[in-house]
Amino acid sequence: MPAGAAAPSRVYFSDGYKRLVLGLLVTAYTFNFIDRTIIATIGQAIKVDLKITDTQLGLLGGLYFALLYTLLGIPIARLAERFSRVNIIAAAVVIWSAFTALCGTAGSFTALAAYRFGVGVGEAGLSPPAHSLISDYFEPKKRASALSVYSFGIPLGTMFGAVAGGWLAQNFSWRVAFMLVGLPGVLIAVAIKVLVKEPPRGHSEPDAVALEGVAPPLEAVVEPAAPGRGLGGELSETWAVIRTLFGKWPVANMVLGVTLVSFAGYGSGQFIPPYFIRAFGLNYAQVGLIVGLVGGLSSGLGTLVGGFLTDRLARRSARWYALTPAIGLTIAAPIYISVYLQSSWQAAAMILLVPGIFAYTYLGPTFGVVQNMVETRRRATATALLFFFLNLLALGGGPPFTGWVIDHFAAFHLAHPDMPGLGQAVAGFFGADRAAYQAACPGGVAAHGAAPELAAACKGSLVLATRQGIIVALCFILWGALHYFLASFGLVEALARARADRGEGD
């Protein structure tokens, strides 16, 4: 600080106000995931109506959303390091909500794909600035817990999207479902703009926390925006964060872990609702309740437990930020796979209550480590770069990969009904004639007036292929768990060095 300069005035945010801010951000993230994942619940209706393949359905739920979502995340994050994060979030919510509603007007695969690109543009503006805001409101020892609460929007949004989307698609249409879940976002944007204050950067770091309480509650003093850096400066800052995420062994392994687990989650999740419809003949509303309430309760509990449990265990050793996810994911993977080996939907739904409690422990610890490894003005950028890598590969690649596998397996099983094994399908994968399958079973069902034998063959091959495709995707969970285990080696030292580099004590 220059000589003679006045000490910056401090601001005190009450615990109640912090909970309000976190609650609003969770609400925004919930609608983020409703609008993002509702396509999985109503995907079967879209597939039949537009007569598209599972690969195309996977592209709508994956790459066509993820491409601009990931590419725009980094420049938006750089803006969030210098300007109002609250304004960026409010604008982003309005944009993605409008494009979600427009999805309901699409008359073709091309139009729907274009609107999904638009949804991705808007959603790119939420999590990077939100993670940065949360890190300024909550001190490091509570950061994993706070970020796990924010991440609770993932299962909550998936749950509400499944239940509401399924009911709307069943009673109205998939078009109405898109329109009605998109519109409430405008109200959320207004609430965030009016109620959330921009905290000073680094407000909750150890040296700042000790000074809280001087100023009256809720009278925020926003520090001046960082000076312009120019293109070279922005690239230098971005490169510094890249070195942190990928140049340090424990952090790089956590990034790989979250990416692989998300690849499995997005890839299988896109086809879980269609699986219950195809395998058990359930309607959209029933599937929405199963996937939403059953799966949502499990994953929601796991998300919260992961953050709070890890913050508690990390008091003994920071290795638990990696070990908690490693153990939880290893337990969860075989339970998830067993869901798709059941002969009744009731048994599958009962088992689905369990694995999310263990699997979703990875979110809070991962985001907490990433935020704690970087300086205050690099936090939005760190989240954007993490999400760039994660979502381009996991969200962009997971659903198309799973759909591509299902299409090949379905073609193989239609041509070889006497070879139902997963190993047999893998062995004959590249010899499968997808074009012949699509001609015989457009949209996964036999053409109107086709022979009953062909109709049964189309249905049977698609059900078996969907089950096996989901199982293949779920195997990536174990690969991710391995990286979390590897991340536990050196994590204590890496976090200690990061604190020392920022001039913080323990």
Image (cartoon, helix red, strand yellow):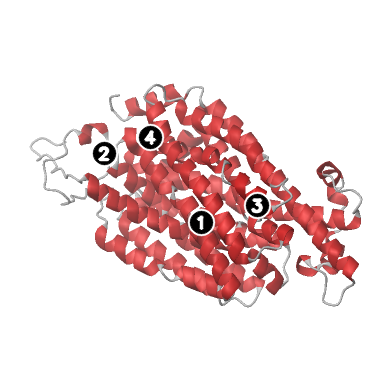
- Distance from Cα at disc 2 to Cα at disc 4: 12 Å
Quadrant where the C terminus sits is top left
Q: Tell which circle, 2 or 3, labels the residue nearer the N-terminal end.
A: 2
Residue 51: give x, y in percent of width and height: 73, 71
Identify which residue, 398 or 449, lies in the foreground. Answer: 449
Label 4 sits on a secondary structure element that is helix
- In the picture of the structure, the residue carrying the numbered disc 4 is 372
- In the picture of the structure, the residue carrying the numbered disc 3 is 346
- Distance from Cα at disc 3 to Cα at disc 1: 18 Å
- Distance from Cα at disc 4 to Cα at disc 3: 43 Å
- In the picture of the structure, the residue carrying the numbered disc 2 is 204
Identify which residue, 416 or 290, lies in the foreground. Answer: 290
Residue at 55% over, 43% down: 356
Q: Which amino acid type corresponds to the residue marked 2 in the rendered image?
A: Ser
Q: Tell which circle, 2 or 1, labels the residue nearer the N-terminal end.
A: 1
Q: Tell which circle, 1 or 4, labels the residue nearer the N-terminal end.
A: 1
Instruction: Say the numbered circle drawn on residue 159.
Output: 1
Is 357 positioned to the left or the right of 141 in the image? right
Q: Which amino acid type corresponds to the residue marked 4 in the rendered image?
A: Asn
